[in-house]
Amino acid sequence: MFNTLAKLMLTGTALAPVALVYAWVLYADGNCDYALYLVGASVALVIVMLWLLKYSKTHLERSQFKVTSIEAADREHITFILLYLSPLFAAEFGDLNWNVLIPTLIVFLLVISTGYGYHFNPLLGLLGWHFYKVSTEEGVSYVLITKKELRSAKQCLTVGQLTEYIVIDLAENGDAA
């Protein structure tokens, strides 16, 4: 179980597109160096996240997971689109209130990394990953990350535990769901 690292990586990659929008604003303002740093940081976050998911497929302990209910957990895309586009509402990059923005991002990362909350990651959604809220026979709810499209409950999956309440499907993509 990766716990804090997985939470930070899922959150960080969810915010990576925001950095790309800020990079565009910086580039438009003529700050190409800073724009390249943000693009590099975004690409690095995505690479590390993809590595973490691939690593987890081969190194996490496998366990059988009996699903009793399934609900799509990747419906928050409108919220993220607004978040992604919010930097464009500033006339210039210098107009952003950094005294508010930086502490807000730090508090957001701390809340996500220390709590049980999880926000859908639309960037991984674009890469073919799906997020489901699943419940077990014991009544415990988890977020399941998988490349499969799940259409029925009452199935048994092979999963690894990324965090206390986030599991990843460890079966091959070709396995029936």
Image (cartoon, grey):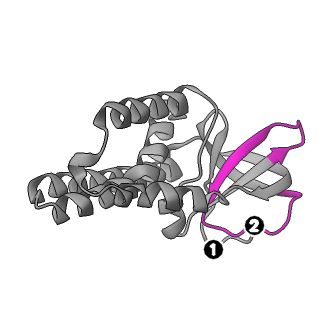
Within-10-Å neighbours for mark 1: few <14, some 14–19, many 20+: few
Amino acid type, residue under disc 1 in the picture: Gly
Q: Position of residue 101 (x, y in %)?
A: 36, 37
Q: Which residue bears the numbered disc 1?
A: 174
Q: Which residue bears the numbered disc 2?
A: 150
Front label number (1 vs 2) = 2
> Between marks 1 and 2, how big is the CA–CA gap?
13 Å
- Above or below, 29 against 133 in this view is below
Residue 22 lies in the magenta stretch: no
Q: Is residue 35 left or right of residue 141?
A: left
Q: Is residue 47 left or right of residue 78?
A: left
Amino acid type, residue under disc 2 in the picture: Leu
Q: Secondary structure at mark 1?
A: loop
Residue 148 lies in the magenta stretch: yes
Q: Quadrant of residue 105?
A: top left
Q: Quadrant of the N terminus?
A: top right
Q: Which residues are magenta?
A: 135-155
Q: Is residue 81 left or right of residue 30?
A: right
Q: Is residue 160 left or right of residue 135?
A: left
Label at residue 85: none
Q: Position of residue 78 (x, y in %)?
A: 59, 62
